[in-house]
């Protein structure tokens, strides 16, 4: 088994040079998917054997697994299987009856109903799904100092049928020009092994992953739940529990399958905007234990919302919704107390069976922002780089 030092050395000694930064969206996905056999920029489907050329350094970023908390179980007695948005109730005599704020189950059921009522966009195979988003992320330097960067405006173009080359363009106030990242599509069953540098890496076999057509992600709650737990079993995730005097992690804990499945649902919601998939995701997540509702949260764009959350291994994953319509706004990762009660701490993670995630350096203080992402707009366009 490899030592902690060799594991961290494999992740690289430092960030890429300042003049060669990939978009934060790409960095975040690589950061949170270290050691996974397949990681694309977030929003992008998983492709076996494909990876990104750029690698993050061990002391660079403090982050937890990409995730969000979502739950959608139908409350008992809901007439017709529907739940109306909360509003002022009334007794028989007409006097107002205060209603309790919706809990996690109600929030996600309302979100599922909003998704079900959203008409699918017309999309032809040769077109692209355009996603406009904004991100905020924190980084930790070698001295343990935390810096929050953002807002980072990200525009992403994903192939509707998964066969065309996509594109990520990111603007940031600190940059003189936007950063562009090429996303290699799966054409004729082949794709560049390193998808952001197709001209320098060999072609490997691939299966197209549609951005806005039916694909491997199930559109029913039972199937989607089984899918995310299969991912949890095949791709376990590990998180470090802090650093000792030598700067190396004191140990690692493995995320539970519940948290791992919960995180995968958040990833699906971010990259797949078919209404049927999103509705299924909300309803499936209602069967994952440990979710809670949290009020008075804000997304990366500063919009107020209500969140359904799940907390584990020092990070609170928040799926944020509009408090009036229950439209999905985005997700946050917020530092939380690292409760080791009942956790099995190992000196070195077993990374041979799937992914390992590292949170190098000092763990952030509870309440600190690790990462935020907010969806601003989605649309269908004719070519990568085109704005609606």
Image: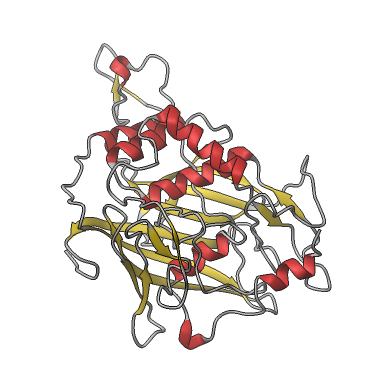
Residue 153 at what x, y percent from top left? 35, 70
Residue 220 at what x, y percent from top left? 37, 30
Horizontal arrangement in the rendering, residue 57 relative to residue 344 (left or right): left
Q: How is the image coloured?
A: secondary structure
- Can residue 72 be seen at all in this image of the molecule? no
Query: Residue 250 occupies which quadrant of the picture?
Result: bottom right
* Camera-nearest residue between 198 and 204: 204
Rendered position, 377 above or below 118: below
Query: Residue 181 occupies which quadrant of the picture?
Result: bottom left
User: Residue pushed farthest top?
Assistant: 92
Residue shown at the point (32%, 69%) measured from the top left: 167
- Can residue 61 be seen at all in this image of the molecule? yes
Rendered position, 100 above or below 269: above
Residue 248 at what x, y percent from top left? 78, 69
Quadrant where the image shows the N terminus: bottom right
Rendered position, 122 above or below 57: above
Residue shown at the point (37%, 34%) measured from the top left: 280
């Amino acid at each position: 088994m490899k030592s902690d030092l060799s594991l961290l050395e494999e992740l690289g000694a430092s960030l890429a040079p300042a003049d060669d930064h990939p978009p934060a969206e790409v960095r975040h996905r690589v950061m949170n998917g270290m050691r996974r056999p397949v990681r694309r920029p977030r929003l992008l489907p998983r492709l076996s054997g494909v990876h990104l050329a750029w690698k993050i350094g061990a002391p660079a970023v403090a982050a937890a697994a990409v995730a969000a908390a979502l739950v959608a179980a139908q409350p008992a007695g809901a007439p017709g299987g529907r739940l109306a948005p909360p509003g002022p109730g009334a007794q028989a005599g007409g006097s107002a009856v205060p209603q309790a704020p919706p809990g996690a189950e109600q929030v996600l059921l309302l979100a599922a109903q909003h998704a079900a009522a959203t008409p699918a966009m017309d999309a032809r195979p040769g077109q692209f799904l355009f996603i406009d988003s904004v991100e905020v992320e924190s980084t930790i330097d070698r001295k343990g100092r935390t810096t929050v960067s953002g807002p980072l405006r990200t525009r992403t173009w994903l192939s509707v049928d998964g066969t065309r080359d996509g594109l990520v363009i990111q603007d940031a106030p600190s940059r003189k020009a936007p950063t562009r990242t090429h996303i290699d599509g799966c054409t004729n069953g082949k794709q560049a092994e390193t998808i952001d540098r197709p001209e320098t890496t060999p072609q490997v076999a691939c299966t197209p992953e549609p951005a806005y057509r039916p694909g491997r992600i199930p559109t029913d709650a039972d199937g989607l739940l089984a899918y995310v737990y299969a991912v949890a079993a095949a791709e376990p995730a590990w998180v470090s529990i802090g650093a000792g005097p030598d700067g190396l992690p004191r140990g690692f804990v493995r995320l539970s399958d519940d948290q791992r499945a919960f995180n995968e649902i958040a990833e699906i919601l971010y990259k797949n905007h078919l209404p049927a998939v999103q509705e299924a995701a909300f309803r499936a997540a209602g069967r994952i234990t440990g979710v809670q509702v949290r009020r008075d949260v804000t997304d990366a764009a500063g919009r107020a919302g209500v969140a359904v959350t799940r907390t584990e291994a020092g990070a609170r994953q928040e799926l944020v919704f509009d408090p009036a319509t229950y439209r999905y706004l985005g997700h946050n990762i917020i530092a939380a107390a690292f409760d080791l009660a009942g956790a099995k701490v190992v000196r070195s993670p077993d990374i041979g069976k799937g992914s390992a995630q590292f949170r190098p350096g000092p763990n952030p203080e509870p309440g600190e922002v690790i990462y935020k992402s907010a969806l601003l707009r989605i649309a269908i366009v004719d070519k990568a780089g085109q704005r609606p």
